Amino acid sequence: MTTAPVRLRTKASWLVNQAATVAHRLAMDEFAKSGSRRYHYGILAAIDENGPSSQAALSRCTGIDRSDVVAVINELAAAGHVDRAPDPADARRNLISLTDPGTQRLDQLEDLIRDTQDALLAPLNPAEREQLTRLLARVVEHHNG
């Protein structure tokens, strides 16, 4: 990165993009080793936090496109990590819920994400990591409302 022009190296937007590229690569490598995809983690985490959810709700809360949510749920259901059941309030849609093996898988993926975060943020001490996370969350919240 030090070979990049100063005009780039001093722009937060460029630095965030570079960090995101590294984070994405690290995460993809780890997910591939475990036979998962990053969307698996997002969907499992959303169901764990929000309880049984419709595919549309999962799309909204994770930012994953609806068509991708369907494919991910199919993969997770085939692996026994989620169940589909008719929504008692609206029989036209299904509610997706976490199974016990799905909870175990989420725990495994959480460990993987923690290792990825540690690799990404290796040059920072714990206080700096927390500060960076807070600042990035504030920027994201500002732009996502």
Image: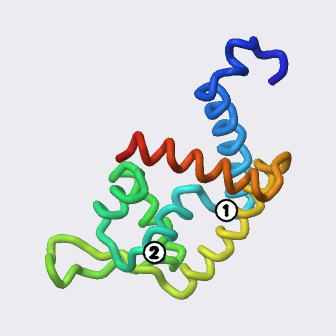
Q: Which amino acid does label 1 sit on?
A: Gly
In x, y percent, where is residue 112? 72, 64
User: Element at badge 1?
Assistant: loop
In x, y percent, where is residue 43? 47, 65
User: Element at badge 2?
Assistant: helix
User: Which residue is located at x 81 percent, y 49 percent?
Assistant: 124
In front of the other: 51 or 131: 131
**Marks 1 and 2: CB-CB under 8 Å?**
no
Q: In this view, does 134 lie above or below 25?
A: below
Q: How far apart are marks 1 and 2 (CA)?
A: 23 Å
User: Which residue is located at x 52 percent, y 57 percent?
Assistant: 39
Q: As drawn, is 144 to the left or to the right of 105?
A: left
Q: What residue type is labelled 2?
A: Glu
The 10 Å Cα crowd at callout 2, few under 14, some 14 to 19, many 20 or more, is few
User: Which residue is located at x 39 percent, y 74 percent?
Assistant: 50
Q: Is residue 34 above or below residue 137?
A: below
User: Which residue is located at x 35 percent, y 57 percent?
Assistant: 59
Residue at the bottom extreme, as displayed? 100
Q: Quadrant of residue 35?
A: bottom right
Q: In which quarter of the image is residue 101?
A: bottom right
Q: Name the residue under label 2.
A: 49
Q: Can residue 110 be seen in this view?
A: yes
Query: Which quadrant: the N terminus?
Result: top right
The circle on residue 93 is: none
Q: In which quarter of the image is residue 113?
A: bottom right
Q: As drawn, is 111 to the left or to the right of 140?
A: right
In x, y percent, where is residue 17? 62, 31
The circle on residue 35 is: 1
Which numbered disc flags the more N-terminal residue, 1 or 2? 1
